[in-house]
Image: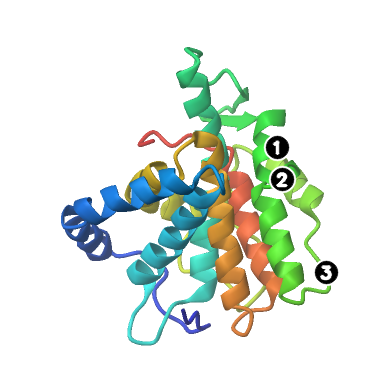
Amino acid sequence: MRVRNVCIPGQVQKSATQEHDSADAHQSTAEVAMIAAIEAQKKSDPLVGAKIAGKEIVSRLINGMKNEKGVHVESLLCALGALAGYSCQANLRAQAIARGLDPNAPFQVVKTNDGEEYYFGDPLNEALAEGKLSVWSLAAAAAQDAGAKSLPDLNEIFQHTASVLGSDQFGLPRFPSGHNAGDLPANYLTILWPVIHPVVQKLAGEPILWPVAYGLAVQEVITTGKTAIAPELAVTLVMEAAIPMSKVRLTSS
């Protein structure tokens, strides 16, 4: 896989998602075989489904975001961060529903003056930043393995996200000059989640493994893209998108 730091439009075109829809119609047999193979390997490798799902995430995003020049790596990382962050919330909602609980049961729900709801709480932080297989743990490990000399101040990103809740600054990544993504995390999430996540559900299986799959996808892009973008910057771009998007309500999910 080649991930190149070149400028192309950051928005994922609808035609790309339509191509995937068309391709999916012809992949049902292969998909069934893949899922059967995953089930057969789970005893020896409980993460096999998440690993395969992670590779599928990267493949689909690159196919949807590339043009003749390649892929704009900042846009790819921003999109991945948005999906990874939201998957932490979606995982907890799915687990609550499976137990017969209210989908909001795992969260502390904060309502702002504009009527929006945002989601907080220890279980969400565990999946996003505190667990051994959290999005942050996987992203930071990849960055360090790729040669990062420093890592972003995660607490500062959390604090900033909370401080701008309900304002027009919420969800605006603070990317360094010259490294902006082609679109906002919320737009990537809205467009991509309905396209990408059904595949993750099938391949990764248990909801607790959804964030792991997205985290492994982040790892792959940081590792393979290290010559295009410094790994310490790559992990910053991911978390600047992931943390706010873990808090939002996505009605289409």
Residue assigned mark 1: 126
Badge number at residue 129: 2
x, y percentage for residue 94? 47, 28
State how far apart marks 3 and 1 are (Cα). Answer: 22 Å
- Residue appearing at x 46%, y 79% in the figure: 1
Residue assigned mark 3: 150
- Please state which amino acid type lies under the numbered disc 3: Ser
User: For this view, does 12 lie left or right of residue 185?
Assistant: left
User: For this view, does 205 lie left or right of residue 28?
Assistant: right
x, y percentage for residue 78? 54, 62
State how far apart marks 3 and 2 are (Cα). Answer: 17 Å
Relative to 242, does residue 131 appear above or below in the rendering? above
- Please state which amino acid type lies under the numbered disc 2: Ala
- Please state which amino acid type lies under the numbered disc 1: Glu
Relative to 113, does residue 72 appear above or below in the rendering? below
- Mark 3 and mark 2 lie on one chain; the one further toward the N terminus is 2
